[in-house]
Image (cartoon, rainbow, N blue to C red):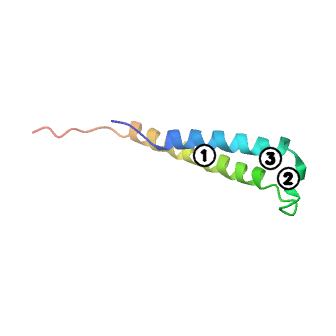
């Protein structure tokens, strides 16, 4: 069974990161007055997106590595 949990984790974090970063860019700027002007939504969104892309790259690399290896079966 070739189930790699990194694919759904990567897609989920990438999607949430894009949504949160867009909210940080397009949202009301007055809500950041309480946080000294720091746009934490954008920063966290970029962080989530980067983590999601990293998980997708690792999953792709892992699946390419397992496909490239010849599968040897023990024959007795």
Query: Which quadrant: the N terminus?
Result: top left
In front: label 3 or label 2: 2
* 1 or 2: tag closer to the N-terminus: 2
Residue at image mark 3: 24
Q: Are marks 3 and 2 in contact (CB under 8 Å)?
A: no
Secondary structure beneath label 3: helix
Whole-number angstrom distance, CA of label 1 to CA of label 3: 18 Å
| Quadrant in the rendering for residue 26 | top right
Residue at 85% x, 61% y: name it.
Answer: 34
Seen from this angle, which residue lies furthest bottom? 36
Locate residue 17, reporting x and y percent: 68, 45
Foreground residue among 45 and 56:
45
In the rendered view, does 31 fall on the left or right side of 71? right
Residue 39, compared with residue 70, is above or below; it is below
Whether residue 60 is visible: no
Secondary structure beneath label 2: helix
* 1 or 3: tag closer to the N-terminus: 3
Locate residue 24, reporting x and y percent: 80, 47
For label 1, count other residues whose C-alpha is less than 10 Å away and answer few (under 14), some (14-19) or many (20+). Answer: many
Foreground residue among 28 and 18:
28
Foreground residue among 45 and 53:
45
How many labels sit on residues? Answer: 3
Locate residue 62, reporting x and y percent: 46, 44
Residue at 51% x, 39% y: name it.
Answer: 7
Q: Mark number for residue 31? A: 2
Foreground residue among 47 and 19:
19
Query: Which quadrant: the C terminus?
Result: top left
Whole-number angstrom distance, CA of label 3 to CA of label 2: 10 Å
Residue at image mark 1: 52
Whether residue 62 is visible: yes
Locate residue 60, reporting x and y percent: 51, 40
Residue at 65% x, 42% y: name it.
Answer: 16
């Amino acid at each position: 069974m070739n189930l790699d949990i990194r694919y759904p984790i990567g897609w989920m974090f990438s999607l949430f990161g894009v949504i949160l970063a867009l909210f940080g860019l397009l949202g009301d700027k007055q809500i950041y007055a309480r946080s000294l002007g720091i746009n934490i939504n954008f920063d966290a969104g970029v962080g989530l997106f980067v983590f999601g892309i990293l998980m997708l790259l690792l999953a792709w690399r892992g699946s390419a590595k397992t496909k490239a290896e010849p599968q040897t079966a023990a024959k007795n």
